[in-house]
Image: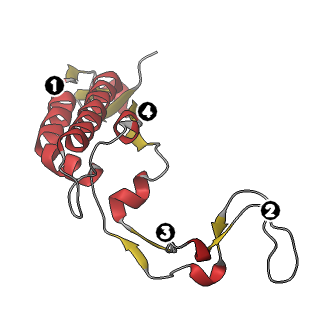
Amino acid sequence: MAIAIEIIIPAVSIELKAKAIRRALGAAGRLLAATARGLIESSPGGAGNPPKNRTGALASSIRSSARKSYVKIVASDGGSTALEVGAVSGGGDTHNQANILFAHEIDARGNIKRGANRLKKSAINKNRKMAARPFMNPALESKRDEIQARLQQAIMGDIEFKLTNWRKNMGP
């Protein structure tokens, strides 16, 4: 079943078919995902640059999927949003063992701490900042004109003009 947009003007019918547009959106999504992966794989890293490829998890988590009227590009790796826009969080000195509360250690109140080792509350620094390492926005900016041209070609190339009986379409 083809989805189509139909515009009726007396004597002319214009029809846009969504199949070509959806195909162009899918190609645009794949192009953006590949460009973002390429930026990660060739990056030297550092603040302001795309993140450096270490394990390949971020690059391999980038996927695209075309829907009816939009394309969705997702980096599903856990820290991808923090890398794209930067982050402010806690953290602390993990090199100093006095700051670490070890599993099964007894705290000041006499309670046995369970689970994994973690930092003591007093050792957490609230001013830790990570600079942005954008990879999706630069990919979009570098391919914006190409994507716009592809979508325009899909829309304009798939328009059908048909002569119609305008009296029949206008009603009684």
Question: Which residue in the structure is indicated by mark 1?
Answer: 157
Marks 1 and 4 in Cβ contact (< 8 Å): no
Relative vertical location of residue 109 with respect to residue 140 in this rendering, above or below = below
Question: Which residue in the structure is indicated by mark 3?
Answer: 95
Lower position in the chain sequence, tag 3 or tag 4: 4
Q: Nearer the viewer, mark 3 or mark 1?
A: 3
Q: Secondary structure at mark 1?
A: helix
Of 128 and 101, the residue lying toward us: 101
The CA distance from mark 3 to mark 1 is 62 Å
Q: Position of residue 104 (x, y in %)?
A: 80, 62
Q: Position of residue 17 (x, y in %)?
A: 31, 24
Q: How is the image coloured?
A: secondary structure
User: Counting other residues with Cα less than 10 Å from the Cα at mark 2, is it few (<14), some (14-19), or many (20 or more)?
Assistant: few
Mark 1 is on which residue type? Gly
Q: Position of residue 115 (x, y in %)?
A: 76, 57
Q: Is residue 31 left or right of residue 68?
A: left
The CA distance from mark 1 to mark 4 is 20 Å
User: Counting other residues with Cα less than 10 Å from the Cα at mark 4, is it few (<14), some (14-19), or many (20 or more)?
Assistant: few
Question: Which residue in the structure is indicated by mark 4?
Answer: 67
| Residue 39 in sight in this render | yes
Q: Secondary structure at mark 3?
A: loop
The CA distance from mark 3 to mark 2 is 20 Å
Of 99 and 75, the residue lying toward us: 99
Residue under the image location 86 percent in, 83 percent down: 109
Question: Which residue in the structure is indicated by mark 2?
Answer: 104
User: Counting other residues with Cα less than 10 Å from the Cα at mark 1, is it few (<14), some (14-19), or many (20 or more)?
Assistant: few
Lower position in the chain sequence, tag 3 or tag 2: 3
Name the quadrant of the C terminus.
top left
